[in-house]
Image: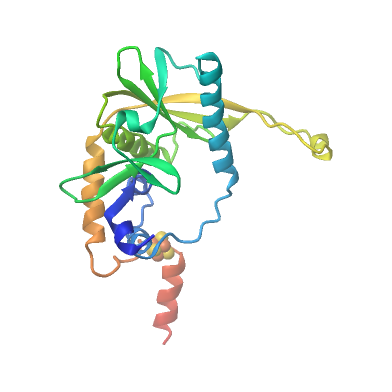
Amino acid sequence: MAENERLKYIGVKELGNLAKGDFCPRCFWYEKHFGPFPSFFPGVFNVIDRNLKNSVWTRWKKEGKLPEWLKVDNVTKILTADSIGVVEKRHGQKYLVAKHKKSGLILRGAPDLILKLKDDTVHIIDFKTSQFKEEDQFFPMYEVQLNGYALLATKMKVSKLSLVYFNPTNEIPNEIFTKENFMLSFGPRIVSVEIKTGLITELLMRAKEILELKTPPSPRENCKGTCYYIEKILESF
Ligand code: SF4
């Protein structure tokens, strides 16, 4: 992606990083100017996410109902992104987009699941293959993601936002590893997220402030990452 496109658009997930306790403005500045750092995140999570979405769609198309594990009330239809907002295609996927006037940034995101409810409002759901914890350090990031989707739904009113966490539910017995294939089961847990789209505006303004800096911001305090070693090396000259 060209640098000016990276600086023009901001994904809801990227914006979510700004809400994390350990957010580093310097990292953000580098990634938006030069592209993301290499990631060692295993691709298996993408496969699980894709299969979850497919399983919901398949069940709906075949039987007109959601799978038993997704206990959500008053659903009349599964919607595509273009039913709730303006979309742009990127790498074969449709993304909701909207320009935020004050910051000039274009917010972009693709919700996992959009459900139309009986009262003609929308319930947006995001799947997370992770263990649910009462004190989840990633929750502020997820909250921003979902509220970002709510803001991008310019054609319909969003009345509900939820996260569906998938926790592994079984201890794997050792003998299972001698088999060629084995099954892992995941137990879903649905967590409601408050609608507060105002926080998106605040974060977009903060993002703009960082991106307008001509040079990278200072390293995050107490970070012992690459910047720390670079500084040590420079000091030694
Ligand atoms: S190494 Fe630390 S200070 Fe440097 S960009 Fe990364 S997180 Fe920020």
The residue under the point 38% across, 65% down is 34
Horizontal arrangement in the rendering, residue 54 relative to residue 37 (left or right) = right
The residue under the point 65% across, 28% down is 185
Q: Is residue 130 visible?
A: no
Image vertical order of residue 39 relative to residue 101, above or below: below
Q: Nearer the viewer, residue 220 or 51?
A: 51
As drawn, which residue projects farthest toward the bottom?
A: 237
Image vertical order of residue 105 relative to residue 111, above or below: below
- Where is residue 135, by image quadrant? top left
The residue under the point 41% across, 15% down is 75
Q: Quadrant where the C terminus lies?
A: bottom left
**Count of numbered marks:** 0
- Where is residue 119, by image quadrant? top left
Q: Nearer the viewer, residue 218 or 3?
A: 3
Q: Residue 65: percent from the left, percent from the top?
A: 50, 15
Q: How is the image coloured?
A: rainbow
Q: Residue 192: percent from the left, percent from the top?
A: 39, 24
Image vertical order of residue 77 relative to residue 4, above or below: above
As drawn, which residue projects farthest toward the left?
A: 102
Image vertical order of residue 47 relative to residue 118, above or below: below
Q: Is residue 127 visible?
A: yes
Q: Quadrant of ligand 1?
A: bottom left
Q: Residue 145: percent from the left, percent from the top?
A: 36, 39
Q: Residue 14: percent from the left, percent from the top?
A: 36, 49
Q: Quadrant where the N terminus lies?
A: bottom left
- Where is residue 32, by image quadrant? bottom left
Q: Nearer the viewer, residue 132 or 12?
A: 12
Horizontal arrangement in the rendering, residue 177 relative to residue 141 (left or right) = right
Horizontal arrangement in the rendering, residue 163 relative to residue 32 (left or right) = right
